[in-house]
Amino acid sequence: MLLYTYMSNGSLASHLHGQKHEPLSWDARLSIALDVARGLEYLHYGAAPPVVHRDIKSSNILLDQFMRAKVTDFGLSRPEMTKPRVTNIRGTFGYLDPEYMSTGTFSKKSDVYSFGVLLFEIITGRNPQQGLMDYVKLAAMEGEGTVGWEEIVDSQLNGNYDVHMLNDVASLALKCVNEVSKSRPPMAEIAQELYQFRKKLNKVHSRTPQELSGFSSKNHSRSRISPTESQEVCIEVDQLKVPDYESKECGSSMEMNRLHIR
């Protein structure tokens, strides 16, 4: 018998594209991205052999009562070293690694590409199956990673985000969607960067209004993100855990009971 935690807040997709939920804050979006990154980090570096998920998308990210994110749906997952070349391309349009589509070869970097698309989906609130990456590429060319990112950020945030951090997260996402897989960062590096962004956000929450004023830009009032408790670590498979970055700040793990890879 398999027992699963009840994910009372549904999928990330329902929060980004549905009408039944309040818009996600920047704080919540960053925490969700970190949870997903740590889940993938475990699959790539904690599992033996390493596992490629192959279908990372917002509808496969479920949220519990505390808005902690969990990676689900392992129907397409495969150990990385088992027959990497396939004849039938599997996955979801809009999230698929272009290198995987052209060569039929998947790897951990295929998940990195899909995660980069997911990051842009979180930033923009746009559906990857409706031309998100064309939209992103246009913004990157026009704004050179600065003004362009502010133009594509989800309007439901109403300016409640730190512009510098937006640029940092978008720049990381852009690295993930590099069309050359070898140029994409590994999930361990991505998770570490997102952890540092989240840590920085926690420091912003603890500052006085006078200190926070230093985070405003010419076009935005200072960040008004609602403070939340520090989010912790990410994925557990049969009691195996991803090592902490800093054990004193990141000690628990995200549960995913009994993952079976066929």
Image (tube, rainbow, N blue to C red):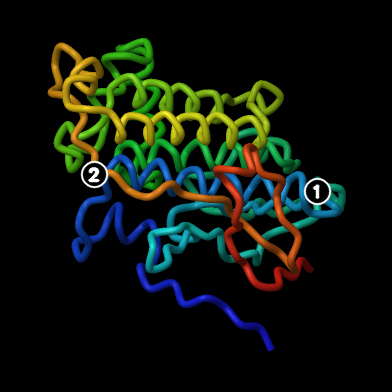
Residue 130 at x, y percent in the picture:
34, 44
The Cα atoms of the two marked residues, 1 and 2, are separated by 40 Å
157 or 143: nearer the viewer: 157
Residue type, label 1? Glu
- Which of the 4 quarters of the picture holds residue 259? bottom right
Residue 36 at x, y percent in the picture:
53, 49
Residue 135 at x, y percent in the picture:
33, 29
Left/right of residue 150 with respect to residue 183 in the rendered view: left
The residue at the point 57 percent across, 51 percent down is: 233
Residue 101 seen:
no
User: Which numbered disc, 1 or 2, marks the residue that appears first in the sequence?
Assistant: 1
7 or 144: nearer the viewer: 7
Circle 1: is it few (<14), some (14-19), or many (20+) Cα within 10 Å? some
156 or 105: nearer the viewer: 156
The residue at the point 58 percent across, 54 percent down is: 234
Residue 75 seen:
yes
The residue at the point 38 percent across, 36 percent down is: 202
Residue type, label 2? Ser
Left/right of residue 258 with respect to residue 230 in the rendered view: right
Secondary-structure class at tag 2: loop
Q: Are marks 1 and 2 in contact (CB under 8 Å)?
A: no
Secondary-structure class at tag 1: loop
Which residue is farthest bottom?
A: 1
Circle 2: is it few (<14), some (14-19), or many (20+) Cα within 10 Å? few
Which label sits on residue 80?
1
Count the numbered circles shown: 2
Residue 64 at x, y percent in the picture:
42, 67
Which label sits on residue 102?
none
Badge 2 is on which residue?
Answer: 226
Question: In this rendering, is residue 37 above or below 69?
Answer: above
- Which of the 4 quarters of the picture holds residue 240? bottom right
Left/right of residue 252 with respect to residue 24 in the rendered view: right
